[in-house]
Amino acid sequence: DNSTTKLIGKDLDEYLNLLKANEETDPGVSSGFPIYDRAIGGGFRRGAVDLIGARAKCGKSTLADNVALNIADRGTPVLILDTEMSQEDHWNRLLANLSGVAINDISSSKFNKEKQLVDDVEEAAEKVKKIPYHYISVAGKSFDEILGIARRWLFKHVGYNDEGRMNDCLIIYDYLKLMTSESINNNVAEFQALGFQITQLHNFCVEHDVPCLAFVQLNRDGITRESEDVISGSDRLIWLCTSFSIFKARSKEEEGEETTISHNVNRKLIPIVARHGPGMGGDVIFMRMTGELARLEEIGTKRDAERIHREQQDGFPDKEETDQEVSDSSGGEIDEGS
């Protein structure tokens, strides 16, 4: 009941007893990328918008699809509100990801030449049909219409549990931008319109007690700089999101400087702001994107990426680093500089 004020301690005992009765779990829906989850505070939390900024053509839609696959594969419903890509584009990427057959070989029907490839693609198609991954194109729709679509999806495909709380799910918004010419006029600047969108999206998540992963375009400074002021839009985007991260390709200059990291490690995810999590303490999350298969793999911190590069060169694992990983996974503290 949010209609009246109440003492902050009211019903606290009931809440504490509920926590004690539960098994230890992450407070949010896991993205499938453990280091990113830990950095933002345990996954995507209810009533919150986690924001990722990216430049055009760097793979943000691939990131969105990989997160969606990771979550839907566990039986948790996912809805992607897509402003750009068609359903066929997503089909080609999902089939490539799950089958190991290149996107272009699928879209051009080249895979038909080999029976094994046909079998692999058909097997992938069966997997896609069974997972609760929902899609809709929202290109050209007003933001109020888009939120109405999301609301109906929650009621129809997610629903409430026995305690009257919305079941686990994730809404992905790809991506925040002006949708129609009516969104902006002489009195409302573009950055203000984007601020209104994040406000509405945040309020929607709070109202329905659901998490949202949203994407936003970085300005040109985002090519080189890694700070919150590279976001295209309003400061309000940062104010109202629970976490803000930058997803970007490693530049040729970075590859030249970071000679101890394989060139196959071609993407970086940099948590900049994390309200509930520790962030990365200035470090970044290195990732490997295989574009032809629309696959994204979390490699780890710089130390992890350097260790893997050494193993590839030497042909055997680094014992010291492996022992440290065992210690970390058993509950030890992660070095801030790792």
Image: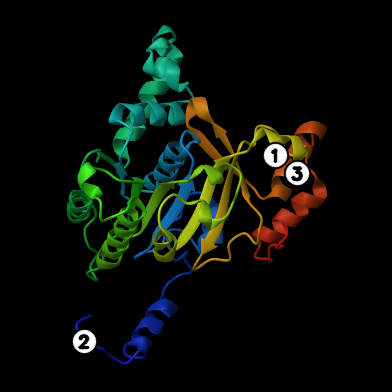
Residue type at the position of mark 1: Glu
Q: On the picture, is 99 further left or further right than 297? A: left
Q: CA distance from mark 2 to mark 1?
A: 55 Å
Out of 334 and 84, give the one closest to the viewer: 84
Mark 2 vs mark 3, foreground winner is 2
Residue type at the position of mark 2: Thr
Mark positioned earlier in the residue sequence (2 or 3):
2
Label 3: few (<14), some (14–19) or many (≥20) C-alpha neighbours in 10 Å: many
Which quadrant of the figure contains the N terminus?
bottom left
Q: Residue furthest front?
A: 186
Mark positioned earlier in the residue sequence (3 or 1):
1
Which quadrant of the figure contains the C terminus?
bottom right
Residue corresponding to mark 2: 4
Out of 166 and 107, give the one closest to the viewer: 107
Q: Quadrant of residue 85?
A: top left
Q: Residue at x 53, y 66 (%)?
A: 277
Q: CA distance from mark 2 to mark 3?
A: 56 Å
Res. 254 mark: 1
Q: Position of residue 81 (x, y in %)?
A: 29, 44
Q: Are marks 2 and 3 in contact (CB under 8 Å)?
A: no
Q: Residue at x 37, y 63 (%)?
A: 48
Q: Position of residue 266 (x, y in %)?
A: 62, 36
Q: Secondary structure at mark 2?
A: loop
Q: CA distance from mark 3 to mark 1?
A: 18 Å
Mark 2 vs mark 1, foreground winner is 1
Residue corresponding to mark 3: 307
Q: Is residue 166 visible in this depiction of the protein?
A: no
